[in-house]
Image (cartoon, rainbow, N blue to C red):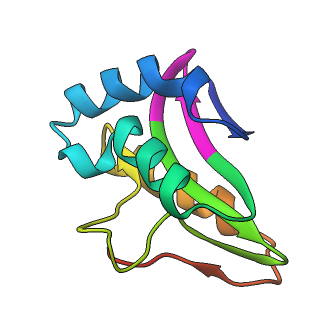
């Protein structure tokens, strides 16, 4: 199976595929692109880094992150009811996280999991 990891700097170009993934995964509203778009407009700082895993050209997992200085962290704060790496299955989530963390010397902070 062909998989691909990409980093995106904007939510809008991914929104359609992201919502389809959320539907397949029966995700809560707080894991959908509309929530992260509203959150980013209200609280965002730094640079968005939305990490995605695609299988055979279809979005299989997404981790909405942002970078401030050298710190990579989840798009969350005290106004966030929940956070997760949205994935269609466990292996997709695991592969995205493994590839995200592989070889990193700086921390990645995921809050409200």
54 in the magenta segment: yes
Residue nearest the observer in this picture, 61 or 67: 67
In this view of the protein, which residue sits in the foreground, 23 or 3?
A: 23
Q: Quadrant of the C terminus?
A: bottom left
From the image, which quarter does the N terminus lie in? top right
Magenta segment's dominant SS is strand
Apparent side of residue 47 relative to residue 65 in the rendered image (left or right): right
Question: In the image, is 22 to the left or to the right of 53?
Answer: left
Q: Is residue 1 visible?
A: no
Locate residue 13: give its quadrant: top right
Residue 58 percent coordinates (x, y): 49, 18
Q: Residue at x 42, y 46 (%)?
A: 38
Q: Is residue 72 magenta?
A: no
Q: Which residues are magenta?
A: 51-60
Residue 73 location, quadrant = bottom right
Q: Which residue is at 49% across, 57% downward? A: 42
Residue 31 coordinates in the image, percent (x, y): 31, 48
Q: Is residue 73 above or below residue 27?
A: below
């Amino acid at each position: 199976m062909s998989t691909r990891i990409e980093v995106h700097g904007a939510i809008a170009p991914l929104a359609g595929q992201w919502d389809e993934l959320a539907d397949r995964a029966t995700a809560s509203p707080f894991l959908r692109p509309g929530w992260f778009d509203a959150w980013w407009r209200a609280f965002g700082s730094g640079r968005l880094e939305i990490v995605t895993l695609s299988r055979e050209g279809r979005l299989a997992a997404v981790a909405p992150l942002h970078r401030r200085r050298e710190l990579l962290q989840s798009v969350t704060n005290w106004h966030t009811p929940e956070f997760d790496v949205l994935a269609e299955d466990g292996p997709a989530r695991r592969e995205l996280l493994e590839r995200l963390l592989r070889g990193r010397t700086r921390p990645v902070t995921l809050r409200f999991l």
